[in-house]
Amino acid sequence: MQRRTFLHTTALGVLSAALSGRLCAAGKQKQLPNIVYIMADDLGYHDLGCYGSRKILTPNCDRLANEGMKFTDAHSPSAVCTPTRYGVLTGRYCWRTWLKDWVINDRMPLLIEQGRLTVPAMLKQYGYTTACIGKWHLGWGRRNDAYQKGIMEPGPLEVGFDSFFGVPFSHNSPPASEVFIRDRTIVGMKDGESVTDKAAVNRCRRKLEDTAIELSAEAIRFIENNKDKPFFLYYSTTNVHLPHTPNKRFRGRSSLGKYGDFVVEFDWAVGEVLNALDRLNLTNNTLIIVTSDNGSRHSGSNLPWRGAKAQIYEGGHRVPFVARWPGKIDHASTCDETICLTDLMATCAELMGLALPHNVGEDSESFLPALYGKKLSREREAIVHHSVCGMFAIRQGKWKLIEGLGHGGNFNFGVGLYDCPGLPRIDEKTGKVHDLSFEPKAFPQPAPGEPPGQLYDLDADPGETKNVWQEHPEVVRRLQKLLYQYRISGHSRT
């Protein structure tokens, strides 16, 4: 059976037209920058030295900030991992899919829809070799229990990656998914075996304390093997998600216990990539970005912001974001533009000279001008935040409106993620996946005379301590209307 990449046909036609006569020449291809996108798991805004940490030494990330640009107002589209990963690769908010809250578990199908254009699929049309290394956590196959049945496609390769090596779900997975996968095969699994075979799983289980070492080695091999052509590396680390399992070489390297040591290990992994780029003379022609999929659960890691991972407050979704591209990005520069991790797609498109079709990257706005030190000419009036329980917020300028009370980040609502009986319902004829919600508990209700939601002036009150909903009814109405439009229209980018 011939395998194919699932590209949106309209988008593919636009891409083909853009490619014609412009990018086939090898000389032109050599001018395209390599793109390395390193995304940590649960790394907090305050965990890096360049963002104020004094208890964890992160010389490699600090080097990037010194040689490039540090963003102070960058946000993940969700306060948890699966939705953010969907947004990074598609340029679209995950709440527009069948997954309405929480994250997927190992019984759920691939979240990226058939026919949807992704960042790697787009870049492949421009001659890039693409790789996903690290944490996937976007599902496998088109049916429930595909992973248990050994049906590993569609997966990363079918949505635009030339190769995949990493973990199928999360660092805290059950034993059956505590393995490595290469492309479409569980590493070490023999023909006829499956993840329902406990003996086979025990033989194939990865060592948690060696995971970062092995992923780093794979990332370096990919860079070495593709040094003579443009490449896109999406390197999604398992650091620093629970359980905190730093390799023995990093233990005791911080004053924050295993968590801090795990951050040190992440910084080491960044350094391995930087060293490889230097050694292969690729530094000057590589755009490298380091960020996180959401905020941290560790106390103090999200300072000066309120809240933590899973929550709607800033600490849940304001993330470190450092970019370097020598000769293009000024050294030791800082940018206060509000950006979102969904913006990778539009940024890569602008690098290629492509205007995205309206039905591609619907929530993605290019931050390329910001990298060049210019103000963004906004194609999007605001960005939308989303908590683990499905609470919405919208941010426009200094104003942030939260649609409800409380933080919206209760990890203990409903049923356990891996014991969830409510798998998505799939139409057997069409393959359509029906909407799935983990049915969060009701959010706190206002007392008599209290507002039904929250409004914060982040310029005057960056800690989100004073709810000014009742003082600014015109702002509330405007942001409620805009959020409603974003939900029903299917896009936020104009």
Image: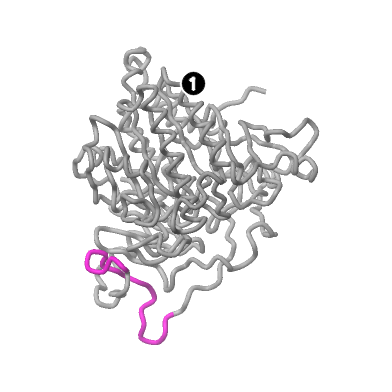
**Residue 474 in magenta?**
no
- Image quarter where the C terminus lies is top left
- Figure label count: 1
Query: Is residue 388 at all visible to an observer of this figure?
Result: yes
Residue shown at 28%/65% (left/top)? Answer: 462
Determine whether, in the image, residue 380 is placed left or right of residue 184. Answer: left
Question: Would you place residue 73 above or below residue 165 in this image?
Answer: below
Crowdedness of circle 1 by 10 Å Cα count: few (<14), some, many (20+)? few
The spot of residue 139 in percent (x, y) is 60, 44
The spot of residue 447 in percent (x, y) is 42, 85
* Residue named by callout 1: 225
Prevailing SS of the magenta stretch: loop
- Image quarter where the N terminus lies is top right
Determine whether, in the image, residue 48 is placed left or right of residue 145. Answer: left
The spot of residue 402 in percent (x, y) is 37, 67
Q: Which residues are magenta?
A: 446-463
